[in-house]
Image (cartoon, rainbow, N blue to C red):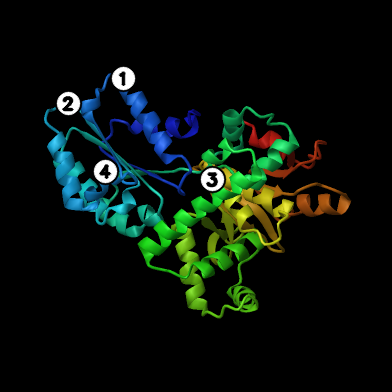
Amino acid sequence: MLKREMYLSRIRGFYDSDLIKILVGIRRCGKSVILNQIIDEIKEKGTDDEHIIYVNFEFIEYEELQDYKKLNKYIKEKIIDEKKYYVFLDEIQKVNRFEDVVNSLRASINNISIFITGSNSKLLSNELSTVLSGRYVLFNIYPLSYREFIALTNKNGKSEETFWDFVKWGGLPNRTQFTDEVNIKDYLHSVFDSIILRDVVERLGLKDTILFDLLLQYIVDTTGRQFSAENVMKFLRSEGKSVSTETIYIYLDALCKALMIRKIYRYDIHGKAILKTLNKYYMTDLGIAQIKNNNFEINKSFAIENVVYNELLERGYDVYIGKTKDGEIDFIATKTNEKIYFQVAYLLADDKVIQREFGAFKDVNDNYPKYVLSLDKVDFSKNGIIHKNIIDWLLEE
């Protein structure tokens, strides 16, 4: 089993904290595995089974605990001494008013450390922030990074064949169990169906699954391009589906809440402001994109751009599109006092492409690092702008 050290190293310092630890991510990205790895580490420090309370709401034996009052009673009855108890509540979004339960437990019991996971962005909502009022710490969990994919599969990470396998079929851990493309597709379809049926239809009550399919298909086909509701409506009409702009945004928001797609905003570099218009969408997992790809062949340029975006998120950056005076920069990645600019290209095929990618930084006058990433093996670095092979960059510690 792959030990997801990138996440564990961030969470370890909070094992005994009274802050509620929230792990949130798309279904099947590996949250339960991380919880079990945390449990193993806590046991290694000397905690016995009686002081570990684990409830997975995907398991039918815990179905009655989806009643928040029964859940609260169940946990309190298990706490019988003054030693530290560790409570793990997996896929907690199935419990209505779960936030009241965890807040009540944290407030009323001193010797408790609570971990929760979920596959729905309700765990990121203002409502949750209000109820828990700063008494939690949140960890975004993503599908496998390229480095994790290599560690799990023992494949040659430097091989472009391996890289394109990752780009095409994504990083959901269980998909690595299959080598036949038919099996991989079947697995990814099952994940997609479970997300739509459980996290969207069941939880949000939006039942037009055909519209979800079409919208996701459009997002896949236009990944990395500015979003236009008008263009979506034209596309839907061509597919025999006529809906309002309001409905489009409701369904897009549902896909975001299910963590299947992510919205990225533009940042005005000179005005130093986040802009709420002309945003873009990227896929959380490119395997899901592949099964919804109407063109069958992936657009390599936009696919690797999506890979870079996901990698930056996994490395803990906040990511924006950079708006300059005359154009844009693919990504601005920020973290505390750190800022990095990125241009992403498939190949720097000729002087025109080189000029375009390196020239994107001409209006940026600060001294923060600037990178151009591509699959080229020749180093084109110049004028203080660093060029890196994208595979080498993905494999960096």
Residue type at mark 4 is Glu
Q: CA distance from mark 2 to mark 4?
A: 27 Å
What residue is pinned by disc 1?
Answer: 45
What residue is pinned by disc 2?
Answer: 83
Q: CA distance from mark 2 to mark 1?
A: 14 Å
> Where 39 sits versus 238, above or below?
above
- The structure residue drawn at horizontal position 14% and vertical position 44%, both measured from the top left corner, is 73
Check disc 2 and report its element: helix, strand or loop.
loop
In the image, which is nearer the foreground, mark 3 or mark 1?
Answer: 1
What residue is pinned by disc 4?
Answer: 61
In the image, which is nearer the foreground, mark 2 or mark 3?
Answer: 2
Q: Position of residue 329 (x, y in %)?
A: 67, 55
As drawn, is 370 to the left or to the right of 69? Answer: right
First of labels 3, 1 by sequence position: 1
Residue type at mark 2 is Lys
Check disc 3 and report its element: helix, strand or loop.
helix
Q: CA distance from mark 3 to mark 1?
A: 31 Å
Check disc 4 and report its element: helix, strand or loop.
helix
> Where 52 sits versus 375, above or below?
above
Residue type at mark 3 is Leu
As drawn, is 257 to the left or to the right of 67? Answer: right
In the image, which is nearer the foreground, mark 3 or mark 4?
Answer: 4
The image quarter in which residue 44 lies: top left
State if disc 1 and disc 2 touch (CB < 8 Å). no
- The structure residue drawn at horizontal position 52% and vertical position 56%, both measured from the top left corner, is 262
In the image, which is nearer the foreground, mark 1 or mark 4?
Answer: 4
Crowding at mark 2 (Cα within 10 Å: few <14, some 14-19, many 20+): few
First of labels 2, 3 by sequence position: 2
> Where 75 sits versus 222, above or below?
above
What residue is pinned by disc 3?
Answer: 313
Q: Position of residue 107 (x, y in %)?
A: 17, 44
State if disc 4 and disc 1 touch (CB < 8 Å). no
